[in-house]
Image: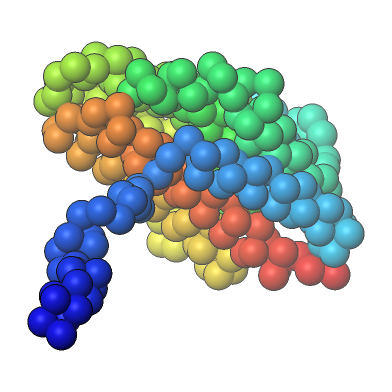
């Protein structure tokens, strides 16, 4: 009897503690991975195509005008001297739904290129704590959305709008240089501070138009103008803030994947918010 009981007790499996179960379970990676980034870019690309189609189908035929400013003689000036005054020549008039369709179509191409033709190069850059391709794509897309926000806020000069877009692209290039400057180290902010200056100059026409219209205008802009401006400027500011924290803290190759996820998320939220705001106003 004793021998049988002893045999049974030997066969009885030992209870494992919760700590040992936890240690033997596979590690779960809750951070960003290249596979997660791939899925997000696919989602962003497909949804951008949907936004482009919905813009064309459901938005009204409201147009925006691009003007070229120039100086001309003021025929009404009560003086014999030649007095020049501002004038504008209309260069083109485009329906805003087609502008949005082009913007979201371009965004879709950018997102899908990151998971197809440019995937290997993109992921090799991420492994090297950099994202040159994505910064260039984001710079172009954000330049267009800031120019559109400025145009909706009645910044009519095409020269000013092009300068605004060029400054945003320049800011993205400076952020690329800043990343490389801090590779393997941290805390070098000289290029980053220059990028803040270019970003501020890019947003200046939009901010001046909003403030001056509120002070001197007979009527305020519609809510959508302020909402679109806030979304765009706040999103750009969020990107700049994340860039600052990354420089101060220093980023490893693994940590850069999480950083890339934040950049992609903010970029997408800016576009999604712009679509919802403009569709709600110009819905037909």
**Which residue appears at 19% of the width and 72% of the height?**
7
How many dots with numbers?
Answer: 0
Give coordinates of residue 255: x percent, y percent: 28, 36
Give coordinates of residue 271: x percent, y percent: 59, 50
**Which residue appears at 70% of the width and 39% of the height?**
108
**Which residue appears at 14% of the width and 24% of the height?**
186
Horizontal side, residue 112 vs residue 92: left or right: left
Q: Nearer the viewer, residue 21 or 175?
A: 21
Q: Quadrant of the C terminus?
A: bottom right
Give coordinates of residue 205: x percent, y percent: 47, 40
Q: Is residue 32 above or below residue 162?
A: below
Give coordinates of residue 92: x percent, y percent: 82, 34
Residue 220 visible in the current orientation:
yes
Which quadrant of the structure image shows residue 157? Answer: top right
Farthest bottom residue in view: 1
Which quadrant of the structure image shows residue 61? Answer: bottom right
Q: Is residue 4 above or below residue 233?
A: below
Q: Nearer the viewer, residue 242 or 150?
A: 242
Q: Is residue 5 above or below residue 251?
A: below
Horizontal side, residue 198 vs residue 247: left or right: right
Q: Nearer the viewer, residue 156 or 110?
A: 110
**Which residue appears at 23% of the width and 60% of the height?**
22
What colouring method underlies this structural image? rainbow
Q: Quadrant of the N terminus?
A: bottom left
Q: Nearer the viewer, residue 105 or 160?
A: 105
Residue 96 visible in the current orientation:
no
């Amino acid at each position: 009897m004793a021998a049988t009981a002893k045999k049974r007790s030997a066969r009885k499996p030992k209870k494992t503690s919760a700590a040992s179960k936890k240690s033997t379970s596979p590690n779960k990676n809750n951070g960003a991975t290249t596979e997660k980034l791939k899925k997000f870019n696919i989602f962003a690309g497909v949804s951008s195509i949907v936004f482009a189609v919905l813009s064309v189908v459901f938005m009204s035929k409201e147009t925006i005008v691009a003007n070229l400013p120039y100086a001309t003689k003021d025929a009404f000036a009560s003086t014999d001297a030649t007095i020049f005054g501002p004038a504008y020549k209309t260069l083109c008039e485009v329906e805003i739904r087609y502008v949005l369709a082009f913007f979201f179509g371009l965004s879709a191409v950018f997102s899908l290129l990151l998971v197809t033709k440019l995937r290997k190069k993109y992921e090799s850059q991420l492994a090297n704590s950099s994202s040159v391709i994505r910064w260039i794509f984001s710079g172009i897309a954000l330049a267009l959305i800031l120019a559109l926000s400025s145009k909706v806020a009645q910044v009519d000069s095409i020269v000013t709008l092009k300068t605004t877009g060029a400054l945003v692209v320049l800011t993205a290039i400076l952020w690329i240089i800043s990343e490389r400057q801090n590779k393997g180290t941290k805390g070098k902010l000289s290029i980053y501070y220059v990028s803040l200056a270019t970003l501020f100059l890019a947003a200046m026409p939009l901010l001046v138009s909003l403030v001056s219209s509120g002070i001197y205008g007979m009527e305020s802009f519609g809510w959508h103008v302020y909402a679109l401006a806030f979304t765009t400027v706040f999103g750009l500011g969020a990107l700049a803030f994340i860039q600052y924290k990354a420089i101060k803290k220093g980023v490893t190759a693994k940590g850069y994947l999480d950083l890339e996820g934040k950049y992609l998320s903010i970029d997408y939220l800016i576009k999604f918010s712009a679509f919802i705001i403009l569709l709600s106003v110009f819905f037909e």
